[in-house]
């Protein structure tokens, strides 16, 4: 098992299609990314809980339990189901890198700021136009009345 840059032995107590229970000589804190290798099989996952030497791992791909136990080569490429044309991504959430999330957030903030400023400036322009119209309407009304002969 590789944890960080270190390699060590691991004992797998049980496995399911998406996780496993294991023990190791070194403590594996929650959140640690680990890689377990057995002959042709590579299992990558994140430690989701830890108590003493025991820890639970949520794997990124489905585990070929029979293949791992019997140490046979995998029947299919990791991440895809046998007979499928590609990986089954239903129910999986795409992990968005923080840089992409930051860029997306900045674009949204810039657009939102533009819309708010446009609304404020538009409202201010309407308010100023009404004031100017009110100021100029009285003198023009007086001039119009004089020109009409009233």
Image (cartoon, helix red, strand yellow):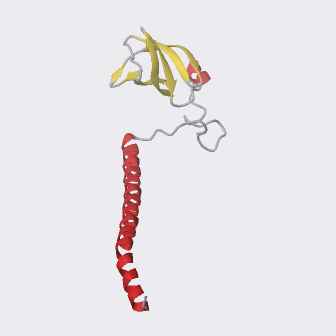
Left or right for 44, reference 106: right
Which quadrant of the rendered structure holds the N terminus?
top left
- The foreground one among 42 and 29 is 29
Left or right for 85, reference 47: right
**Residue reaching furthest to the front:** 150
Which quadrant of the rendered structure holds the C terminus?
bottom left
Query: Is residue 63 shown above or below 132?
Result: above
Seen at 40% across and 44% down, the residue is 101
- Image x and y of residue 85, in percent: 63, 44
Seen at 61% across and 38% down, the residue is 90
**Residue reaching furthest to the right:** 83
Seen at 35% across and 67% down, the residue is 128
- Image x and y of residue 53, in percent: 42, 9
Query: Is residue 24 shown above or below 96?
Result: above
- Image x and y of residue 24, in percent: 42, 12
Left or right for 67, reference 144: right
- The foreground one among 126 and 37 is 126
């Amino acid at each position: 098992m590789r944890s960080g840059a270190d390699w060590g032995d691991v004992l797998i107590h049980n496995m399911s299609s998406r996780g496993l229970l294991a023990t190791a000589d070194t403590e594996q804190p929650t959140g640690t990314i680990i890689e377990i290798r057995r002959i042709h099989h590579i299992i990558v996952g994140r430690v989701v809980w830890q108590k003493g030497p025991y820890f639970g791992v949520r794997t990124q791909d489905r585990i070929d339990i029979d293949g791992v136990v019997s140490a046979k080569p995998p029947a299919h490429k990791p991440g895809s189901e046998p007979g499928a044309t590609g990986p089954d991504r239903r129910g999986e959430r795409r992990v968005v890198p923080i840089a992409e999330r930051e860029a997306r957030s900045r674009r949204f903030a810039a657009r939102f700021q533009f819309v708010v400023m446009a609304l404020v400036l538009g409202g201010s322009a309407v308010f100023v136009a009404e004031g100017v119209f009110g100021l100029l309407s009285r003198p023009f009304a007086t001039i119009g009345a004089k020109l009409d002969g009233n």
